[in-house]
Image: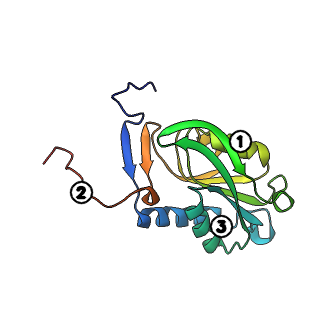
Amino acid sequence: MSTSPDRPPYEKGFHISWDQVHRDSKALAWRLDHQGPGAEGAWKAIVAITRGGLVPAAIVARELNIRVIDTICVKSYSHQSQTSAQVLKAPDAGLIGDGEGVLVVDDLVDTGRTLEVVRAAYPRAHFATVYAKPKGRPLVDTFITEVSQDTWIYFPWDMALQYVEPLRGA
């Protein structure tokens, strides 16, 4: 989508509350329960893609009783502008290997640039996001909610409470 200087890169905004991200992350855990390759469908570890994947990964880990959690730190946004994905920190290579039995969790897949980088490093991992946009959806194995490509998701960790004008004005 092309944008002009007086127009934001996203047409729509979707505000997610703490309660909603908790419910959606728990729903993700329900979908992933007994889906791992281990005994009784267990996962051996979770890798959270920081920073957005930290909260959903913690909820999924609790619900699925996964004790081993690591992070991969990837930077692919500067405000609302997407940049090329850059790995700032990788998880423990001895633990994660090629990703077999590992659940990689993020809050959102947008264009898929971040997941392309992580999937190339861990091709046998299972990729799960809470929210997915159409361009990135093919890179995700499991997700909960699809949103349109032109929607910016406002997560609760990025927000502060303040007055909002009604849709049709005051």
Q: Tell me the element at label 2.
A: loop
Q: Which residue is mark 2?
A: 163
Labelled disc at residue 129: none
Residue nearest the observer in this picture, 5 or 71: 5
From the viewer's perspective, is residue 43 above or below residue 104? below
Position of 27 with respect to 34 (left or right) is left
Reading the chain from its start, which is encountered first: label 3 or label 2?
A: 3
Q: Amino acid at mark 1?
A: Val
Whether residue 149 is visible to the viewer of this picture, yes or no, is yes
Q: Amino acid at mark 2?
A: Tyr
Gap in angstroms between the C-alphas marked 2 and 1? 39 Å
Disc 1 packing (10 Å; few <14; some 14–19; many ≥20): some
Residue at coordinates 83% horizontally, 62% vertically from top-left?
95
| Residue 123, position as x, y percentages in the image | 78, 46
Residue nearest the observer in this picture, 107 or 28: 107
Q: Tell me the element at label 1.
A: helix
Q: Which residue is mark 1?
A: 117
